[in-house]
Image (cartoon, grey):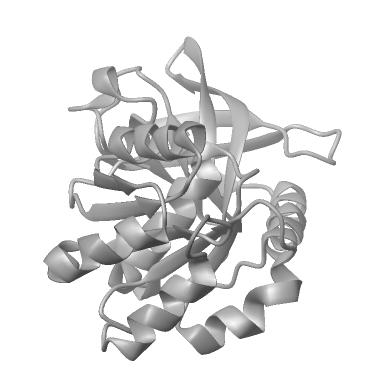
Amino acid sequence: MITRDSRTVLIADDSVFFRSKLSDILVEAGHRVRLVKDGRELIEELKIDAAGIDLLMLDLQMPDMDGFGVLDWIDRNGLKGKFPVLVITGVYEPGDVMERLKGLGADGLMTKGLTPEQIIFRVNRLLFPDKASAGKPRLRVPVSIPADFSVGEAVRTGYLLNLSETGAFLNTRAELLAGAVIRLRFSVPGSPGVIEARATVKWSTSDVSSKTLFGGYGVMFISISDEDLAVLKEFISGEADRLGLEKD
């Protein structure tokens, strides 16, 4: 969940509460944040330093000039495609506006009801498309699932924040070494059973885990039963359909 490749995200939203919420989430995940309260203020920021923006998070419903107006201005002023735009909405259903937004150059759409894990998942997919496309295509879904894990006899509890059929991001402040083999036990929503798997630690954010909500480890499954794998695949496929996600 944490990136060492910090990027600058410009957030445009007229809600002080939601701007602050997004800012806190993105800073926790390792990014830099700039904030504006409406479309006019956003345009002034773009005129000053459009090249310094790696991602624009744009609310559709803003006073004076809304998100549609901003996207039109970006297009008319030669900035379309210069940075990805993730549109935010608390009113429109995604299906109602997606085609119009695509035509205006938006790269994604999210609702204001998403969890922090889902927000970071979508932000990082747009900020790091090369990483998302590297390796074997697979479905990954943002989740927040309690999981027991153990190395040897010690059992601890963490959270899975990112889940695929090949591995997960394990959110914990416990200290684990790269290459360590752990035993995982967790349940996915909608299934009464417990999934058990052995996994190896591939990478960590342990250097910043004490300072952030998203510290932990990327783990890869190395042993899981066919029955548990089938349950996992069904859950991931259903979540991906619900969230409108594709393989990356």
In the rendered image, which quarter is residue 79 located in?
A: bottom left
Residue 229 at x, y percent in the picture: 69, 53
The location of residue 107, given as percent across then percent down, is 46, 75
At 51% across and 12% down in the image, what residue appears?
155
Residue 151: quarter of image: top left
Q: Is residue 137 visible?
A: no
Decide if residue 105 is on the left or right side of residue 43: right
x 34%, y 80%: residue: 74
Is the residue 173 above or below the residue 194 in the image? Answer: above
| Quarter containing the N terminus | top left
The residue lying furthest to the front in this view is 64
Residue located at (65% from left, 43% from top): 113
> Does residue 196 sit above or below 11 in this rendering?
above
The x, y position of residue 201, in whole percent, is: 34, 39
Q: Is residue 71 left or right of residue 3?
A: right
Furthest toward the top, the residue is 154
